[in-house]
Image (cartoon, helix red, strand yellow):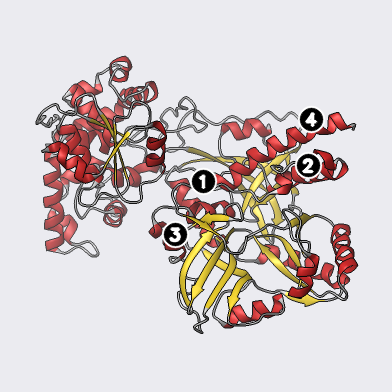
């Protein structure tokens, strides 16, 4: 490869690496596996070493990647949080040892597992937690203190009142927590996190700290960034001191001065990998003596006193024997492959999700094919590729009917999943009932998921209309429900009959139709009959509707079970007419408001109702069509975008002045 070809290849590599870095670090949604990304960066580094005149300051090899979110306050790291140079072979580890010995005599090394999570810095003053921040670009991170305080592993108070201490650690999601989260996301039809690292990163960047608490994140600390009032001479001494202070220190680290033993320790950590409760993606080798580290120094991106050995992914071959199709709680048809047993990451695997028809087509999967399989993040089994097609094998096609109820499954535009939209589908029964009774739908007080599950398990209800046939004697005998509870529940169910039509429309669980869209339908057509008989063109003409939403409404009411359910609800006395709010005046006519942040006294839905009463509209996103942004505390990216577009921004006080 000559210089011109190298320059073109370097430019192409940088573009691809930057794209995948954004997907990994900023969006927590990687598209390629770590080993494929590592191969790109390794090729770039080798080309830049061959042609050093082509190295630029913005190259991935010269900087720490990570963009700051607008949701959190920036924090400048007093001690930068750098990254480590990756190595992939024993020869590279020995080359590292040789370079170290050229500068310092008789080095000792600490070998420790490389935890696969999100790097953070935590500061303590007088032994008390005061702040925690993400790594960001290594120099400036994001203040996520409120979220870190939800992690049980992070002590709020150290065992001694150390004057000042800053430690670096890795927030990770244990494998058990990740598996539970994936199950929940699949059941709810949500986008599923690809691996525990991205789950941890996505969770730690949540605006609501309670989400962090529910998802069970953990932490290991692996470096002492700064300590005041004490002298620390080595890395191993700092690890012991941090453990003494009550911090969860990275496990099973070892100290040695023998490079042969370093390699033995690396292999030993790799052998433990499959049986751990958390993810690791390598082993880190660090010079122990802090004075020797100063002599060795740093490159523009990496310290010269440490390397990270990356383990190759484990892949094994097996045979796809059959494909089972089930129906999720959101109606998605989920294909699962059944394979000959194969041992991966310490466990026997016989089943793996095949996601959807797109995935099956992309891999060219057919029954009897020999495939390469691995565990994504060492947890979730996945098919990597077809190694050999079976003789006379044909690509598998998902059924076009729901295996639970026999209804025709549909695949909506721009979606990969086949979906059953029959409201009477047994596989979706409980989820549909929970949605129908929820606060934003029929708002039936006391009819939460636990009670609904109890009613379904006792065969008292099957669909929403069954709620209106319940009797006191049926309820009061159930576990946890006495006479008074039964009476209260029946009263709440009866009261829901008077709800506005939009609540009934939303409660039906029509795909793509949220509460706001349900209100638009109710206001436009006035009655349920008119909504059911509207054409897609009529619905799409509503301001705020699109073709996909309109088609979804038409498809739902084209199903006989949907119409039968509505008829039974009407027979039970449920209101099927819109109770249109009277407009006080039209001072906000033609204006679109966006609400963001926490308002001092008003809830967002209360403010939206006021705006609508005065003839205005609300939107969930800021655009050039936005008239006013009503902003409260902790307003995030919407406020930033409004400022960039020059849109008028008001407070709640100013909003109230507009109403007077």
Mark 3 and mark 1: span between their CA atoms? 16 Å
Label 3, label 4: how far apart the Cα atoms are = 44 Å
Residue 457, position as x, y percentages in the image: 31, 54
Vertical arrangement, residue 601 with respect to residue 618, above or below: below
Which type of secondary structure does the marked residue at label 1 adopt?
A: loop
Camera-side residue of 68 and 262: 68
Where does the image place residue 497, in percent across and percent down from the top left? Answer: 13, 40
Mark carried by residue 8: 4
* Secondary structure found at label 4: helix
Which circle's residue, 4 or 2, is located before the other in the chain?
4
Residue 270: tell me if it is visible: yes
Q: Position of residue 478 (x, y in %)?
A: 22, 61
Marks 3 and 2, how far apart in space? Answer: 40 Å
Image position, residue 353 (x, y; %)? 58, 44
Q: Residue placed at 73% from the left, 42% from the top?
A: 371
Q: Where is mark 2, residue-wise? A: 55
Q: CA distance from mark 4 to mark 2?
A: 13 Å
Dot 4 surroundings within 10 Å: few (below 14), some, or many (20 or more)?
few
- Whether residue 353 is visible here, answered yes or no, is no
Residue 355 position by quadrant:
top right
Q: Which residue is mark 1?
A: 192
Compare marks 3 and 4 and give the one earlier in the sequence.
4
**Quadrant containing the C terminus in the rendered view:** top left
164 in relation to 549, above or below: below
Work out whether mark 1 precedes mark 2 in sequence or the reverse, and give the earlier one. Answer: 2
Q: Which mark is residue 305?
A: none
Disc 3 designates what residue?
212
């Amino acid at each position: 490869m000559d210089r011109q070809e190298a320059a073109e290849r370097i430019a192409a590599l940088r573009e691809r690496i930057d794209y995948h870095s954004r997907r990994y670090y900023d969006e927590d949604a990687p598209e390629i596996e770590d080993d494929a990304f590592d191969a790109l960066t390794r090729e770039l580094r080798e080309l830049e070493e061959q042609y050093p005149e082509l190295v630029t300051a913005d190259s991935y090899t010269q900087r720490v990647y990570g963009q700051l979110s607008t949701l959190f306050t920036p924090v400048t790291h007093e001690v930068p949080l750098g990254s480590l140079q990756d190595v992939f072979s024993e020869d590279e580890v020995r080359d590292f040892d040789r370079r170290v010995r050229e500068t310092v005599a008789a080095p000792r090394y600490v070998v420790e597992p490389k935890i696969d999570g999100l790097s953070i810095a935590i500061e303590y003053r007088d032994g008390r937690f005061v702040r925690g921040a993400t790594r960001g670009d290594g120099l400036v991170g994001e203040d996520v203190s409120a979220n870190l305080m939800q992690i049980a592993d992070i002590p709020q108070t150290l065992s001694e009142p150390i004057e000042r201490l800053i430690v670096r650690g890795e927030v990770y999601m244990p494998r058990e927590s990740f598996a539970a989260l994936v199950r929940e996301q699949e059941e709810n039809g949500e986008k599923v996190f690809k691996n525990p690292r991205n789950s941890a990163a996505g969770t730690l960047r949540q605006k609501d700290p309670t989400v962090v608490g529910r998802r069970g994140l953990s932490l290991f600390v692996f470096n002492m960034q700064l300590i005041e009032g004490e002298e620390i001479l080595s890395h191993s001494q700092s690890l012991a001191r941090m453990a003494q202070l009550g911090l969860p220190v990275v496990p099973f680290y070892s100290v040695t001065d023998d490079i042969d033993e370093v390699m033995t320790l690396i292999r030993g950590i790799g052998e433990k990998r499959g049986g751990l409760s958390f993810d690791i993606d390598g082993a880190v080798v660090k010079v122990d003596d802090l004075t020797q580290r100063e002599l060795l120094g740093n490159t523009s991106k990496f310290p010269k006193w440490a390397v990270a050995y990356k383990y190759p992914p484990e892949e094994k071959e097996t045979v796809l024997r059959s494909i089972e199709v089930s129906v999720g709680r959101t109606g998605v048809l989920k294909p699962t492959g059944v394979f000959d047993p194969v041992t991966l990451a310490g466990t026997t695997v016989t089943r793996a999700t095949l996601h959807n028809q797109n995935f099956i087509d992309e891999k060219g999967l057919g029954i009897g094919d020999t495939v390469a399989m691995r565990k994504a993040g060492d947890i979730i089994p996945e098919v990597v590729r077809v190694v050999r097609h079976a003789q006379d094998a044909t690509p598998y096609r998902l059924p076009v009917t729901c295996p639970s109820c026999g209804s025709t499954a549909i695949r909506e535009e721009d979606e990969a999943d086949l979906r059953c939209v029959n409201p009477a589908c047994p596989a979706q029964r409980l989820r549909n009932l929970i949605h129908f009774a929820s606060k934003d739908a029929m708002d039936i007080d006391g009819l939460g998921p636990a009670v609904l599950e109890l009613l379904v398990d006792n065969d008292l209800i099957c669909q929403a209309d069954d709620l209106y046939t319940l009797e006191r004697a049926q309820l009061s005998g159930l576990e946890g429900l006495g006479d008074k509870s039964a009476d209260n529940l029946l009263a709440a169910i009866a009261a829901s009959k008077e709800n506005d039509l939009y609540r009934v429309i939303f409660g039906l669980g029509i795909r793509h139709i949220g509460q706001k869209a349900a209100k638009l339908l109710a206001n436009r057509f006035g009655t349920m009959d008119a909504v059911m008989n509207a054409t897609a063109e009529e619905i799409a003409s509503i301001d705020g509707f699109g073709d996909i939403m309109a088609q979804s409404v038409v498809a739902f009411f084209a199903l006989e079970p949907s119409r039968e359910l509505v008829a039974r609800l009407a027979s039970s006395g449920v209101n099927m007419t819109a109770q249109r709010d009277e407009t006080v005046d039209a001072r906000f006519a033609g204006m679109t408001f966006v609400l963001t942040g926490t308002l001092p006294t008003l809830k967002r839905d209360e403010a939206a109702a006021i705006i609508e009463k005065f003839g205005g509209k609300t939107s969930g996103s800021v655009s050039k069509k936005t008239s006013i942004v009503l902003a409260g505390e902790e307003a995030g990216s919407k406020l930033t975008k409004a400022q960039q577009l020059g849109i008028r921004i008001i407070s709640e006080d100013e909003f109230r002045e507009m109403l007077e």
